Amino acid sequence: MAALAWIAMAASVAAFPMPLVLPERIAPELLAAAARLDELTRSLTGNVAELRAAERISHHRLQTSIAACMQTAGRPYSWAPPRNFYADFTDADLGYGTGRVTIVDSLTEHGRRHMLNELAYARLEGTSSGTVRPADRQTYIRCRMALRRQPSSDLPPGAGLAGFGDLLEPAYRDPRVMAAWAGYRPCMRRQYGFEVGDRSHFLFQQRFSRKDAPIAGRRPASAAWTRGVADMEAAFAADADCRRPAYVLAMRHVADGLEAWEKRHRAEIGELRAMWRQQVTEAARLPSSG
């Protein structure tokens, strides 16, 4: 994924800081459990450095395959520049509850991961192809199509385990959690004027467009983008407030069961950590360019 200077991209994100206020009425041990859940999520699905390494490896393999295919066809090809989807992400943006739409989603994330995704997609649009002469375009397309027929997955290794199903399911079956959750939609309607049917659709509906996103050195944020991000923040903040009673009760289950969960999955966690460390090592060995 095409690289862009970190400082430039950070400036784009800094123009729209997300609220990051510690939730009230949350016991310290529950905050600690939430932080540990974030750490485990990154252990399983990769921290920023590990995801960037995996992205670099994927880019190198893709470009190597395309170049070999073009060479076999007797066509010149210059590699596409590397893409860095995670250029302006931090580890704090990769915790649990950034888009999962569960009761124990983060109370402070407020849609930042969603915004960062859209900024990255906007920044990377039109930057995926290497240099190909017009006369060689059809050959290049055939080489790309051959690669697309190979099996692939958008989910990172560890994504299944990072759902924490066997840890969270007992919480969601708890009658007290369910009773508290029953008040969520009435709260959203009464306190904030939001009618929430499908919660995922409500949170991630299109409030802003990539075409309006700020891209350092290319365009500033439009008024539409600024309004859309503010609308998203308001929706996520309301969601966190109305979800808080059920969150507290469910997170108590997490706090009580997290240590046992880690022991139960120790071998799987160890294998995934070894895999991610290998990704970093492999990426460091790659040449700086094609």
Image (cartoon, helix red, strand yellow):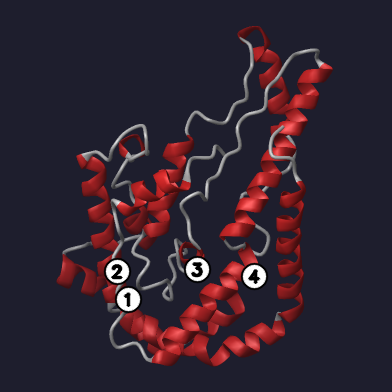
Helix, strand or loop for disc 4: helix
Which residue is painted at 47% across and 86% down in the image? 32
Q: Nearer the viewer, residue 190 or 252?
A: 252
Q: Label 4 is placed on what type of residue?
A: Leu
In this rendering, the label closer to the viewer, 3 or 4: 3
Q: Which residue is mark 4?
A: 161
Q: Nearer the viewer, residue 3 or 36?
A: 3
Which residue is painted at 80% across and 26% down in the image? 68
- Residue 256: x %, y % from top left: 53, 92
Helix, strand or loop for disc 1: helix
Q: Which residue is mark 1?
A: 243
Helix, strand or loop for disc 2: helix
CA separation in Å, label 1 and label 3: 18 Å
CA separation in Å, label 2 and label 3: 18 Å
Q: Which residue is mark 2?
A: 239
Which residue is painted at 61% across and 52% down in the image? 52
User: Which badge, 4 or 1, is on the more N-terminal residue?
Assistant: 4
User: Which badge, 2 or 3, is on the more N-terminal residue?
Assistant: 3
Is 165 situated left or right of 191 in this image?
right
- Residue 278: x %, y % from top left: 76, 59
Which residue is painted at 74% across and 40% down in the image? 287
Helix, strand or loop for disc 3: loop
Q: Nearer the viewer, residue 92 or 248?
A: 92
**Looking at the image, do the residues carrying marks 4 and 2 touch, with CB atoms under 8 Å apart?**
no
Q: Which residue is mark 3?
A: 95
Q: Would you identify the image quadrant in which residue 41 lies?
A: bottom right
User: Which badge, 3 or 4, is on the more N-terminal residue?
Assistant: 3
